[in-house]
Amino acid sequence: MTRFRYPAALAVTAVLTLIGSVSLASEGGWLVAVPLVPLTAAVWAWRVGTDVNTYGIRVRSLLRNRVVAWEDVTALVPDQRGGVIAALVDNSALQLTAVKVADLPSILAASGKTPAELPADSPAA
């Protein structure tokens, strides 16, 4: 299984911000809610990502997981921001969290699949 995650520095920064926000929360009133923002950011940074194995793709968000089998994936397409989108059989798209275009060879290796053969008349052949 290959895991794609955001850098751990995001979670560490959020935890440090959480520690700093405790003094604000000790003032009381509405400031008690201030530490919830860095706490949510820390959990998000630690949890979100994409896992790839021979069965399929699991995309993890803050509150849920979505598992897609390889049979349901028609293509892996780069997006405009340098990320990757999985085009699915039902004509929907699934953003692969924390996956960059440069990670496509790693996804292919983790999937156990081989790239589609190019037609003989293609320019790359």
Image: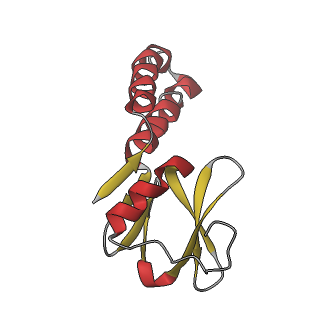
In the rendered image, the vertical position of residue 15 relative to residue 89, given as above or below: above
Mark yes or no: residue 99 visible. Answer: yes
x, y percent for residue 23? 44, 13
- Nearest the viewer among 81 and 105 is 105
- Nearest the viewer among 59 and 40 is 59
- Nearest the viewer among 21 and 100 is 100
In the rendered image, the vertical position of residue 53 relative to residue 98, given as above or below: below
Q: For the point 50% across and 16% down, which residue is it?
A: 24
x, y percent for residue 105? 44, 56
| Label tally | 0
- Nearest the viewer among 5 and 113 is 113
x, y percent for residue 20? 44, 15
Rendered image quadrant of residue 10 = top left
Rendered image quadrant of residue 69 = bottom left
The quadrant of the rendering that contains the N terminus is bottom left
Q: How is the image coloured?
A: secondary structure
In the rendered image, the vertical position of residue 101 relative to residue 109, given as above or below: above
x, y percent for residue 55? 32, 76
In the rendered image, the vertical position of residue 108 relative to residue 48, given as above or below: below
Q: For the point 48% across and 35% down, which residue is it?
A: 36
The quadrant of the rendering that contains the C terminus is bottom right
Q: For the point 31% across and 72% down, which residue is it?
A: 54
Mark yes or no: residue 52 visible. Answer: no
Residue 98 lies left or right of residue 123; in this view the side is left
